[in-house]
Image (spheres, rainbow, N blue to C red):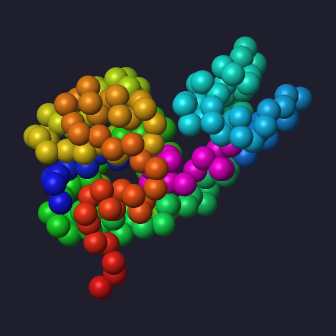
Amino acid sequence: MDYQDYIWDLGGTLLDNYETSTAAFVRTLASLGLEASHDEVYQALKVSTDHAVQQFAPGVKDFLRSYKANEAKELQHPVLFNGAKELLATIIKQGGRNFLVSHRDNQVLEIISKTGIDSLFMEIVTADNGFKRKPDPESMNYLKEKYKISSCLVIGDRPIDIEAGQAAGFDTYLFDSMEHLKNYLHLNTEKE
């Protein structure tokens, strides 16, 4: 393991949520008489929620609130990517530390608890901490200073995760699959 510390994004990196988020977004559009294809919405959400709202529902009053309510219902049953929990545990077993930085509010704490990985993080930073959103590195700089982080890999599935990590002076990894990440890290997460 080349790193002591790992800063993770949640959605699309540990949590397989893009399908549920897309379904909730399309359902919210339909409830307002608007249409968009699944694939178009999926790709827009990969950029950011704000980008998707601007693309498909600009100026629609309370769209974001309605979408977030629908998405919250979908997230009552969160699903991790296969191997995510084992990878987090392996990092700790080998002396590393995991941190999480998410744009979501403290709903993240409930999601993490439901997936059973809450004990695998030193600290979880959410929107409720009041830091600027990624790609601003403010939340990562906070962790860097508080925990004296020097050898760190930031792992996320969007360019904003990579930009924030680089701006904080960390190495970065653009997540595409858990298997590729495990190979990149040279970690064996097989159950003993």
Residue 139: which quarter of the image?
Answer: top left
Q: Is residue 21 magenta?
A: yes
Residue 190: which quarter of the image?
Answer: bottom left
Residue at far right of view: 33
Where residue 9 sits: x, y (%)? 40, 44
Residue at far top of view: 59
Residue 78: which quarter of the image?
Answer: bottom right
Up-down: is 153 above or below 28?
below
| Magenta span: chief secondary structure | loop
What's the magenta region?
10-22
Q: Which of the pair 55/109 is nearer the observer?
A: 55
Where residue 19 sits: x, y (%)? 65, 50
Give the residue at x 42% y 39%.
102
Up-down: is 153 above or below 127?
below
Q: Which of the pair 23/153 is nearer the observer?
A: 153
Q: Is residue 177 magenta?
A: no
Give the residue at x 32% y 62%.
183
Q: Which of the pair 160/95 is nearer the observer?
A: 160
